[in-house]
Image: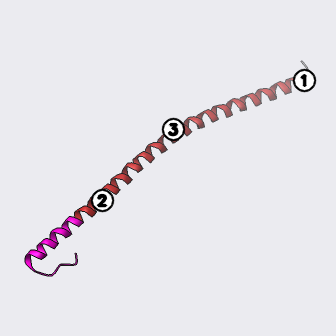
Amino acid sequence: MKPGNESIIKKFGDVEEKIDFLIDTLTTFQLENETLKLKIKDLEAKLEERIEATDKFSEQEILIQSKINGLLGKLDEFSGSPPSDS
């Protein structure tokens, strides 16, 4: 083999090693990316659940406040005192 050919073969070996490293790194990043996508989906689902729970709580709070105001109004009518500004 000619001395120049050995140098070319060595360079091809180096390039092949670097390509293998890049492929391994890419595969690792792809797996991590899929894991992160699943985690994002899970967190989005949990966030949506919390938003729904907060909305439901707010609706219940409004309903309770309305009932309290109604009961206070009835008490005011019963006692003959002027309505309070609650």
Q: Nearer the viewer, mark 3 or mark 2?
A: 2
Asked if residue 75 is positioned above or below residue 29 in the image, the reply reads below
Chain-order first, disc 3 or disc 1: 1
Q: Name the residue under label 3.
A: 35
Under circle 3, the secondary element is helix
**What residue is at 54 percent from the left and 37 percent from the top?**
34
Q: Which residue is drawn at 34% across and 57% down?
A: 55
Q: From what the image shows, is residue 78 above or below residue 45?
A: below
- Nearest the viewer among 21 and 32 is 32
In magenta segment, residue 62: no
Q: Which is nearer the eye, 8 or 74?
A: 74
From the viewer's perspective, tell me whether residue 16 is left or right of residue 2: left
Q: Do the residues labelled 3 and 1 touch (CB within 8 Å)?
A: no
Residue 69, image x and y in percent?
20, 70
CA separation in Å, label 3 and label 1 = 49 Å
Q: Is residue 62 left or right of residue 20?
A: left
Mark 2 → mark 1, Cα distance in angstroms: 83 Å
Residue labelled with disc 1:
3
**Magenta extent:** 66-86
Q: Which of marks 3 and 1 is in front?
A: 3
Q: Say what amino acid the circle numbered 2 marks.
A: Glu
- Give me the C-alpha separation between circle 3 and circle 2: 36 Å
Q: Which residue is drawn at 13% across and 71% down?
A: 74
- Amino acid type indicated by mark 3: Thr
Q: Where does label 2 land, which residue?
A: 59
Residue at 15 percent of width and 68 percent of height: 71
Tag 1 secondary structure: helix
Q: Where is residue 48 in the image (x, y as percent from the top left)?
A: 41, 50
